[in-house]
Amino acid sequence: MKVQHVSVAVLWLAHVPRGIAALDQVILKDASVTPRAPKNVAIIGAGSAGSSTAYFLRKYSKQRDIPLNITVYERDGHIGGRSTTVGVYGDDQNPVELGASIFVEVNQNLVNAAREFNLSTSGIRELHSEGPALGIWNGREFVYTQASGGSWRDTAKLFWKYGLAPLKTVNLMKATVGKFLKMYEEPYFPWKSLSQVAYDLGLTDATAFTGEQFLEKNGIGKLFAQDIIQASTRVNYAQNLPLIHGLESMVCMATDGAQAIEGGNWQIFSHMLAAAEANVYLNRTVDKVSKLDESAYVISSKGTPIDSEQQVFDEVVLAGPYQYSNIDFDPEPRHLPDSIPYVQLHVTLFTSKHKLSPGAFNLPSDELVPQVVLTTLPPGEHHGNGAEGVGSPGFFSISLLRPSMDTRGNRDKLEYVYKVFSPMPLNETFIANILGLAKDESVSEEDVSWMYRKVWHSYPYEYPRVTFEELQLDDGLWYTAGIESFISTMETSSLMGKNIARLMVDGWKE
Ligand SMILES: Cc1cc2nc3c(=O)[nH]c(=O)nc-3n(C[C@H](O)[C@H](O)[C@H](O)COP(=O)(O)OP(=O)(O)OC[C@H]3O[C@@H](n4cnc5c(N)ncnc54)[C@H](O)[C@@H]3O)c2cc1C
């Protein structure tokens, strides 16, 4: 029987193009062979890491014709984790990013997924044609401003003030990104150890030092670092250069092709899970993971009803920071991730008919405040972490995102949507000040018509380090969030998911 199959196959294969041949050989299986039992994988968390793990698991297992069941448990009621939107005025048709808002052109997992799922992307919008698009405020003055669309004047201003530092920074950033991109390619991909691959690619040369040290070592002037690069590390990671490591500082400068998915970046992850044909349980919290033997885990979870409160899996992926998962592992895995400090970031969204007040930024009353206000520390001011690290400016960034028509109750008012990042909750005095309202007045609904506050554990404090968490905590138990101390972005979480998916499928014997 086998001989007959082969000869039919050979005859038929002679008439099909090469690419299809490999695929069709799979169909010519010996009917006497019992079908393989499917692999059962549980993924805890439906953020970028969990969704990407599921998506690539399905891809790789299909390539190897391995039957697979994927179950995703998500504590929240939505897919996306720290990538999520809220509706301005509570209107879902008017979404704004509450967490991760931007990815860039070298983020190949996200860019490819957006293309595959036909999701529209938009660049960063600039609002006013006059007036600066961006300014860097040190609590006393704007140390740098940039016009809409950038101009030769801005470029000339940069070189006049900072010499060759901007050019050197671009070159250093490109060299660093070039090393990082090798993590997607053989012979490095898939990597079993993040510490090893970071070392092999020379990226620990950047993670071992603070941003300040790394820039100095590479001959980048202090003033440019303090004014421009630090503004970027503060808006992206709420951290100053003497703390955040060199690699993450460089990531902040890799802004080419900045984009976002129209309507919300979370849609990438929702589409990934659909493509993975995963069973997704939202509002379902995993509270215990028990190891039965070498290759079986039982997951206990609570929340919205599912078929069974306890389910058995061959492999489990914890796709979010261990310390916030509140999962009891029984027995304790061989490697337990360290608890590491995360930034507590206050994100405040609000709408107002007022533009930002020039007076709040020591500008003459007839000047426009930049649409995006980033911050840095004034000369001589040095600060540590958290609330203290913010220094004189008192906030990390204020962005005027877009105009918005408030149509509630027939108000038909043109307003502006603002987003503020700060280490503390914004109080009324702060809001009154930036909107130019009298300081002793309370902020009325007339002035701020809608507000939404969220406190995130947004990303780790990126202290210099050269070793990173294990990817495999135990046999069949995987962990994605160790990559956040290396680089914390949607793309790197996705890359970790892809890498783990590949290692897992490679580990399944033929
Ligand atoms: C305000 C803010 C701005 C940011 N800006 C950007 C940006 O512009 N660009 C960028 O690339 N990145 C940005 N980031 C970082 C980015 O959001 C994260 O690096 C990335 O989204 C992390 O994805 P993840 O899947 O690893 O983790 P998460 O998104 O945190 O996903 C983990 C998921 O696991 C779930 N979970 C945890 N424990 C359990 C449990 N016991 N049971 C069930 N489910 C559980 C959680 O609910 C969560 O949904 C930003 C983050 C914040 C907060």
Image: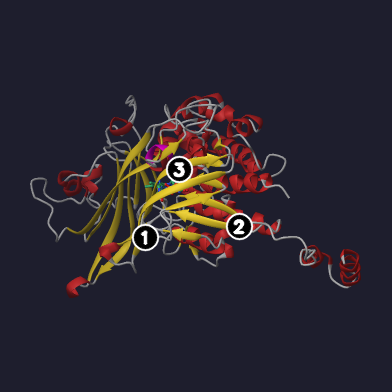
**Image-based side of 346 in relation to 198, left or right:** left
For residue 298, above or below residue 115 = above
Whole-percent x, y for residue 286 in the image = 40, 48
Q: Which residue is mark 2?
A: 68
Q: Which residue is mark 1?
A: 305
Magenta range: 320-324
For residue 454, above or below residue 94 = above
Q: Is residue 386 magenta?
A: no
Whole-percent x, y for residue 382 in the image = 34, 25
Q: Quadrant of residue 429?
A: top left
Q: Nearer the viewer, residue 481 or 426?
A: 481
The amino acid beneath tag 2 is Leu
Query: Which badge, 3 or 1, comes first in the chain's sequence?
Result: 3
Give neighbour class at mark 2: few <14, some 14-19, many 20+ (Cα, 10 Å).
some
Quadrant of the frame with the N terminus: bottom right
The amino acid beneath tag 1 is Pro
For residue 165, above or below residue 418 = above
Do the residues bearing badges 2 and 1 touch, measured as CB atoms within 8 Å? no
CA gap, disc 2 and disc 1:
23 Å
Give neighbour class at mark 1: few <14, some 14-19, many 20+ (Cα, 10 Å).
few
Q: Which residue is mark 3?
A: 289
Residue pictured at 49% horizontal, 24% vertical = 213
CA gap, disc 3 and disc 1:
18 Å
Q: Is residue 74 visible in the rendered structure shown here?
A: yes
Q: Is residue 47 visible in the rendered structure shown here?
A: no
